[in-house]
Image (cartoon, helix red, strand yellow):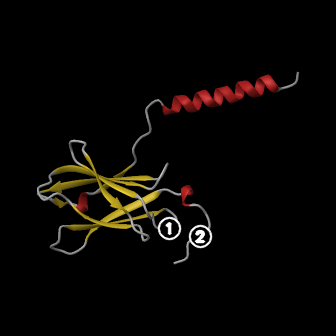
Amino acid sequence: MALSGSPASAHGIESSITRLEALSSQLMLQSQFSNGEPTSDAIVRLVSPDGKAQELGRTDAKGQLSFALPKQATGEWELQVDGGPGHRDYLEMPVKSGQAQLDQISEHRRPSHPWAWLSAVGATAMLLGLQRIRRPR
């Protein structure tokens, strides 16, 4: 597959998880940008229900990474795919007795900081103020 010359930074990330074999505990993460280009070399983290993060590795050139959950894992786990600034995906993964409940995985976007909108408003106001100062009368 030929890669396009456009930078991947203009696209969001879409990820999915499948089980490698019916009786296996190994899972396969597949991650790609919204244009279909694989999310290669993305850092993948597994976050336990108590908030402890464990780095699982990096996706390969096809945007894939295989991994296993801790044997007795239970609760709401999160899988984070970090493809660089502005390119992250978060999958909520219910787990029972070390087995991911693949039919219940949901994708969510982390909300930006609650006050992030304030900085955008401030920057806009500042630019408008500068523009007003520069106008000849």
Name the image quarter holding the C terminus: top right
Q: Quadrant of residue 73?
A: bottom left
- Relative to the observer, which residue lies in front, 103 or 19? 19
Instruction: State the residue lying farthest toward the bottom.
Output: 1
Amino acid type at mark 2:
Ser
**Label 1: which residue?**
37
Give how far across and how far down residue 12 sits, in percent: 49, 56
Question: How many numbered marks have been drawn onto this rendered protein structure?
Answer: 2
For this view, does 89 lie left or right of residue 18? right
**Label 2: which residue?**
4
Badge 2 crowding class, 10 Å Cα cut-off, few under 14, some 14 to 19, many 20 or more, is few
Give how far across and how far down residue 65 sits, in percent: 33, 66
Residue depicted at x 21% and y 42%:
50
Q: Are marks 2 and 1 in contact (CB under 8 Å)?
A: yes
Residue depicted at x 16% and y 57%:
70
Residue depicted at x 57% and y 33%:
120
Amino acid type at mark 1:
Glu
